[in-house]
Amino acid sequence: MKAHLERMIRWMAWADRRVMEALRSQPGNRGESLPLLAHLLAAEHIWLARLNGREPVHPVWPQLDLAECEKLAEENAAGYAGLIRQTDEAGLQAAVRYRNSQGEEFRTAAIDILTQVLSHGAYHRGQVVRELKENGGRAASTDYITFVRSADSQ
């Protein structure tokens, strides 16, 4: 399971970078793509903070420019990679206690939180790509299979 999660986290970081490269190549009208990217990176940050028992620094819908998104994406990628390296199988099943943005308390297994992070990111990267295309830009595929076929997955 850990090896699979490590690969999935590498895919997440790779896909986030590809979206940022696409945004960087389209400095004009980006529609809602930058706010959506900022949200997805903030969500990654918030879940990582919860997994580490810390308070998040960013709100769910932050106002970040592309440089700030790039910095946050790097921090997220390093944080998740470190978390997976340090967590054993029992730790993946352990419940994490946290409060959501409305202050409600929950307990969720770490593996389920990681699955949420990965699926939530894929959802919003798709929205970002759609926004870019609708505003005249082009975005590279962020599909997992594209990652698997690339040298970055090795």
Image (cartoon, rainbow, N blue to C red):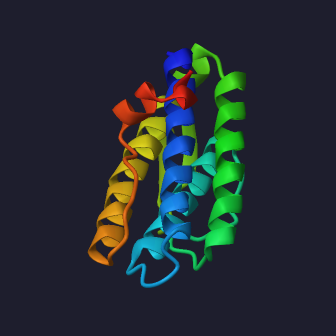
**Residue 34: percent from the left, percent from the top?**
49, 73
**29 left or right, relative to 68:** left
At 56% from the left edge and 38% from the top edge, which residue is drawn? 96
Residue 94 in sight in this render: no
Towards the viewer: 134 or 119: 134
Towards the viewer: 114 or 36: 36
Q: How many marks?
A: 0
At 55% from the left edge and 35% from the top edge, which residue is drawn? 9
Against 130, residue 105 (above or below) is above
Towards the viewer: 60 or 93: 60
**Residue 123: percent from the left, percent from the top?**
33, 53
Indicate the quadrant where residue 124 lies: bottom left
Q: Work out which residue is located at the far bottom of the displayed protein and give it.
A: 29
**Residue 22: percent from the left, percent from the top?**
48, 62
Against 91, residue 26 (above or below) is below
**Residue 6: percent from the left, percent from the top?**
57, 25
At 54% from the left edge and 27% from the top edge, which residue is drawn? 151
Against 60, residue 18 (above or below) is above
**115 left or right, relative to 123:** right
At 32% from the left edge and 78% from the top edge, which residue is drawn? 135
